Image (cartoon, rainbow, N blue to C red):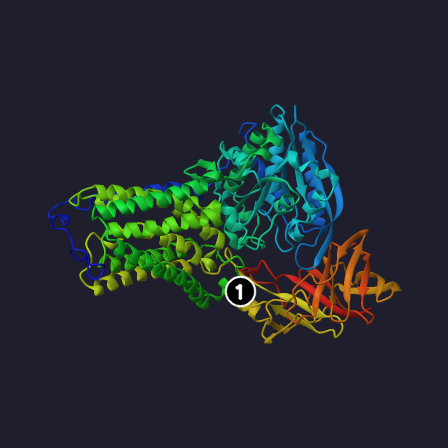
Amino acid sequence: MTLRTLDAAPAPERPDAAPAPRDRLRFLPELLLLLVVTLVAAVPVLTNTTPPDPLPVGAPAGAFSADRAHRHVERVASEPRPVGSAAHDRVRDYLLKEIRATGPEPEVLPALGADTSSGAALTAPVQNIRVTLPGTDPTGRVLVTAHYDSVEIGPGATDNGHGVAAMLEMIRALRSGPAARNDITFLFTDGEELGMVGAQAYTASPALGDPDRTVVLNLEARGTSGRVVMFETGAHNAALVPALGDSTPVTNSLAYEVYRLLPNYTDFTAFRKAGLTGMNFANIGTSAAYDTPQDNLARSSRSSLQDLGTTVLAATRELAADDIPAIRASSEATYFTFGGLLVRYPGGWVLPLAALSAAGFAASLWFARRRDAVRTRAVAVTAATLPVPLLAVAAAGWGAWQLVVLFRPDYTGFVFGDPYRPGMTAVGLAVVAVAVVRAWAAVRRRRCTPVELSAAVTGWLLLLAVLTAFLVPGASYLFVWPALAGAAGLALAARLPGTFRGRDAVAALAAVPAAALLVPVAVLLFATTGLALAAVPLVVVALFAATLPVLAGRRPPVRRRIVALRAASAVVTGLAVIAAGVLGDGVSEGRPAQVSLVYTVDGDTGEARWAGNGTGSHPWADAYLSGGRTALEDTFPPLREPESWRTGPARRVETPTPTLKVLSTRRSGNSRVVRVHLGAEHGAPGQLMLYADNRSGTVESLSVSGRKLPGGANRASLNGRWTWGYIYAAPPADGVDLTLEVRGKGPLRLRVLAQTTGFPDGALRGTPPPTVTWAALDSGFTVVSRRFTI
């Protein structure tokens, strides 16, 4: 009986496996594999990152033209248009005028919208706009939606000027041809930036209609450039996704699983909760400008607008010809795009495919073991060590961002984790990830063959395929197809003679579908998570690199020193690319630093202070925040996080100040009903806020304009004090009456605040320089706070 050496020494190299040095073709199989992998990865990456050219004004009447639509963007996004502002009213009137110019008569749906989903309850007067193109024989309707309000500090050229302009152009294009089978309704929602209050008001009204006979297409933006991504679907998406075939966006069934982890919500969230199904679209490139003053006309991409309009118009036409109630009979689908093609198959295939890959890998491993192509122990040990480089890559991604912000503190101002030009830095990080994996493969190569390396990686792909099939079915496609290819490659490699030059390349067959699936997802994740969370896409990059054992070289390295030197040189190259990317993205007028700066006033003491949440850095802003750090939540409950704010002294100038007047009190046992008038003096604020100290009593409910909102605890509080809050956005000039139901015999302590966009005249010491702008959060507003007891 012969004892087999198990991973205790390098695998014996077959004499005929090492070609003669003069054989110029000795690396041909590996080169061919790398060429195929590069081409397969390049196709989806290029198509996923290159939006189409905009069509001119003279494009056919039935086509979507970004140049035609952009004229609407210029009118809609010339200035910020938050709910209640004069600019908001101007845009509403413009939309009504443009819709009427195409023929149909729009209707305005006024309502008091409310959001009680998370945090302080919020209400706002909203004015949704609806227009319907009747169908010839409708089975239901296609509901196309986009919100027309913007954030308070930015003009929202892309978010959501693009969506609104696309809808106007779509109405014109659809009206130029014959009517569709189904009704097509266009809903311009209001108040999305406040918490989807317009969409929630619509779904709570009879105007919603029958959810089973409605399909929603929502137009959004989470950046200012790039391809449009269909990133979220409702139920029964197997009947929805085919509508994307005529004009395919970037999409995959993994996208929604990622989206659920992000702190973002859209109107589509409200429609889903109301029982509707549909699809959600947005472009996500250049998130640095998202929800800031930089989302302006200068950054508005007509190519992105063309992509959005063409995609949604094609989907609208497809769904408008379908039997909409039949959609409810369909199931879920797994889908992804490759080179402009939409690949889809039933979600019911996910588990069988995972089982097939498991069976295929087990059979291939058994066959390879029988053929002496692999050693079981070598494969197992190699597989057990693969998490080491993956974890190392994740740590490198996290550490790189910490190092970058150490040298570039202005990068902390990018709320969504990406600077203006993240591309080169992302490439450098990817180089580091590949270098780490290459070093691992080279070390393992001293103890195993390339075929064993490939078998070990295929085992991990199989494990991920099975886990995702049960836990995240929409992501299973990423791993199941490479696992199947890897199992087939292992079987073929085992079947080939050891003298066959391309045996190692055949064993690495998993790299081909991995290149088609993992690489474009990594690119998409970089845009989604940003450099701040680059660890996520870097792990995907590392897993793909692991499918290419040829990176370790055809022969095992003789010395560990050589492995270390090669790895170090590759890492240094990656770091150099990272440094070039960071240095090439310096602060300028075109790429201003984003800072947090808020003008706060304690209305009881008269003290004015500047405050910043600590993100972003610029000498101009830092000069206002020179007074040290302090907690602000006790006086200003909305300024809860961070626990400690940068502050500095400020001039006290007149600004809208909140008022509260008790109108009546009616007691009943341990409870009382208190009517109050909430208002402001010295101007009109954009929001009035009311926070209750639940330690002194409990607000059971609040009623406003006939609408009852829940009380109790609806928000987190670091000091445990202000655990219930209410916000009235765009309040009437003369204030609003509220009815509070309070439990507890003692007095109820309140904080009342007035928030106003911008700073009062005379507060700043001159005009901000063009190299600084407001960050997406906690920036560019004034807040005044006062104490009251009822």
Residue, disc 1 = 616
- Give SS at disc 1: loop
**Residue type, numbered disc 1:** Gly
Residue at 24% x, 46% y is: 368
Measuring from the top left, give residue 497's x and y in whole percent.
17, 43
> In which quadrant of the rendered image does the N terminus lie?
bottom left
Measuring from the top left, give residue 161's x and y in whole percent.
60, 44
Looking at the image, which is closer to me, 86 or 263?
A: 263
Measuring from the top left, give residue 442's x and y in whole percent.
25, 58
Measuring from the top left, give residue 522's x and y in whole percent.
42, 50
Judged left or right of residue 438, residue 169 is right
Residue at 27% x, 42% y is: 491
The single residue placed furthest to the front in the displayed view is 1
- Relative to residue 588, is residue 106 depicted above or below? above
Judged left or right of residue 348, residue 292 is right
Looking at the image, which is closer to me, 354 or 82?
A: 354
